[in-house]
Image (cartoon, helix red, strand yellow):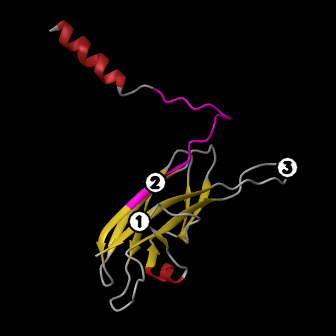
């Protein structure tokens, strides 16, 4: 019985271990997933997915989430146009996260019935742009993106 109590005590302490953060350590801000694959899509359908944003900075950080025409695409995929951005909605377009906070943001693709999409496979991005960080008048803003690869029916 004594060994059982000691084992329980040790197990309870494992869950209480402190987390260590080092000031000035490299940032661990991230956006997930890297790619969202939508297959068998057609105008009139609704495709939605929550992207996840993590603030790895030591201070509160703001992020702007928006549709973006991709800088490049996967092989075989066409670049989506600016016009198609009208059919992508973002739940929270601007979020502020505390240090180490994680937030999910809903992204919805909903091309209305009757709209012609000229490609069988196309790609757009959902950009997540951080606010400039820095001191002495120098601000560096880091941009992240989730790639959305769409295959039409």
Farthest residue toward the top? 2
Secondary structure under tag 2 reads loop
Q: CA distance from mark 3 to mark 1?
A: 40 Å
Categorize mark 3 by other alpha carbons within 10 Å: few (<14), some (14-19), many (20+). Answer: few
At a point 48% along the width and 81% down the height, the residue shown is 84
Give how far across and how far down residue 138 sits, in percent. 81, 53
Q: Is residue 1 left or right of residue 49?
A: left
Of marks 1 and 2, the one in the foreground: 1
Question: Residue 62, relative to residue 86: is it above or below?
Answer: above
Quadrant in which residue 8 is drawn: top left
Secondary structure under tag 3 reads loop
Of marks 3 and 1, the one in the foreground: 1
Q: CA distance from mark 3 to mark 2?
A: 33 Å
Q: Is residue 2 left or right of residue 85?
A: left
Q: Earlier in the sequence, mark 3 or mark 2?
A: 2
Quadrant in which residue 48 is drawn: bottom left
Secondary structure under tag 1 reads strand
Q: Is residue 35 left or right of residue 127?
A: left
Of marks 3 and 2, the one in the foreground: 2
Question: Residue 9, relative to residue 89: is it above or below?
Answer: above
Q: Is residue 52 inside the magenta stretch?
A: no
Quadrant in which residue 88 is drawn: bottom left
The disc placed on residue 136 is 3
The disc placed on residue 80 is none
Report which residue position mark 1 lands on. 149
Report which residue position mark 2 lands on. 34
Q: Earlier in the sequence, mark 1 or mark 2?
A: 2
Question: Residue 13, relative to residue 72: is it above or below?
Answer: above
Categorize mark 1 by other alpha carbons within 10 Å: few (<14), some (14-19), many (20+). Answer: many
Magenta-highlighted residues: 18-36
* Predominant secondary structure, magenta span: loop
């Amino acid at each position: 019985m004594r060994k059982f109590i000691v084992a329980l005590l040790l197990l309870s302490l494992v869950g209480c271990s402190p987390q260590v953060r080092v000031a000035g350590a490299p940032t661990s801000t991230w956006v997930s997933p890297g790619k969202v694959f939508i297959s068998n899509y057609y105008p009139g359908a609704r495709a939605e997915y929550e992207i996840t944003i993590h603030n790895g900075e030591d201070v509160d950080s703001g992020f702007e989430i928006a549709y973006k025409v991709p800088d490049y695409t996967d092989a075989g995929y066409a670049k989506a146009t600016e016009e198609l951005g009208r059919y992508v909605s973002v739940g929270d377009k601007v979020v502020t996260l505390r240090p180490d906070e994680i937030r999910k943001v809903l992204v919805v693709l909903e091309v209305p019935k009757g709209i012609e999409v000229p490609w069988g496979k196309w790609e757009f991005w959902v950009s997540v742009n951080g606010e400039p960080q820095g001191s002495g008048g120098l601000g560096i803003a880091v941009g992240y993106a989730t790639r959305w690869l769409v295959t039409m029916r």
